Image: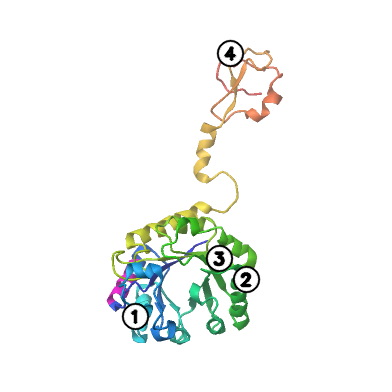
Amino acid sequence: MKTFIIAEAGVNHNGNLDLAKRLIDEAIWAGADAIKFQSFKAEKLVSKSLEKADYQKDTTSKDETQYEMIKKLELDYDEYEILRDYCKEKDILFMSSAFDLESIELLDGLGMKIWKIPSGEITNLPYLRRIGQLNNKVIISTGMANLSEIEVALKVLREAGSKDITVLHCNTEYPTPMEDVNLKAMNTIKEAFKVKVGYSDHTLGIEVSIAAVAMGAEVVEKHFTLDRTMEGPDHRASLEPDELKSMVEAIRNIEKALGSGVKKPSKSEMKNKAIVRKSIVASRDIKEGDVFNEENLAIKRPGNGISPMRWGEIVGKIAKRSFKKDELIKL
């Protein structure tokens, strides 16, 4: 199974189209399957007096409101169209999370076929219903949610028309402390709702995303940036391009390592079998007619003779010919 890896550019373009294109190029270089932006109109997303989250205060101007911060990060319809076409030209899937109903219509007009619902919209009934009506693939993050809220959101999406839904475990703190990751909750979601699951990762580093794949994640989403030192709300908790590439390569290796689940000797190790396993050998010279016993037999490598599992069968039998010390016993 190939993990669907989303390189989350988000708003790390800082409202600049050229930076957004550079992020697309870096996502391709890193080997991601998709790049995802965020689509919103500040007027429809936040109240103008709303304070910023603590992590946003630490990474942006302290004098501005959340509205003022977000307003600077907007892209317009034409710019999203340019980014969609650039992704198509470069052969990477274009995605963007809508944060309001108007942005849903914008992205639907651009022909987007995989919808990523951010954690903050999991309790937004009109929003969920509209995405469900589009009858496309849906990936939904569940940061801050409990199982009952996930259950209700899935019900709304399904009743509206969604049939293919993947649920991502997520923690919305940027960066997420390791003790708050609770990665086992991903499989709790899988068991509770019998859905495909994945992980939206806001931790520092790449190890938790890799662990999620080892635990069965079918989708992994990870923020990345051109430079973590840039001003903006999400840069500090994002990977830089070389780290994103390392994460993708590690995930692809984990996919290979997971294998089929059938326990049998692999092709590469078959050559080691005779060298590493052991056989029953003569511990000293044995003459024809001697009785095999625990004193004149030993267990040593190589393993291309009689298996030590047949020890009880061999002890007590009579040697039909002579054997030199260390020679493989034959009946």
User: Which residue matches tag 4?
Assistant: 285
Q: Identify the residue at horizontal 50%, vertical 59% (top origin).
A: 181
Magenta-tinted stretch: 18-26
Please indicate whether residue 8 sits to the left or right of residue 130 in the image: left
Question: Looking at the image, is 256 positioned above or below residue 155?
Answer: above
Q: Which mark is residue 197?
A: 3
Whether residue 153 is visible here, answered yes or no, is yes
User: Which residue matches tag 2?
Assistant: 148
Dominant SS in magenta: helix
Question: Looking at the image, is 319 positioned above or below residue 178?
Answer: above
Q: Say which element carries label 4.
A: loop
Q: Identify the residue at horizontal 54%, vertical 28% (top origin).
A: 302
Disc with the residue nearer the chain's start (1 vs 4): 1
Tell me, yes or no, whether the two marked residues, 4 and 3, touch with CB atoms within 8 Å.
no
- Return the residue nearer the eye: 289 or 158: 158
Image depth: mark 2 or mark 4 in front: 2
* Spatial separation of the CA atoms under disc 1 and disc 4: 91 Å
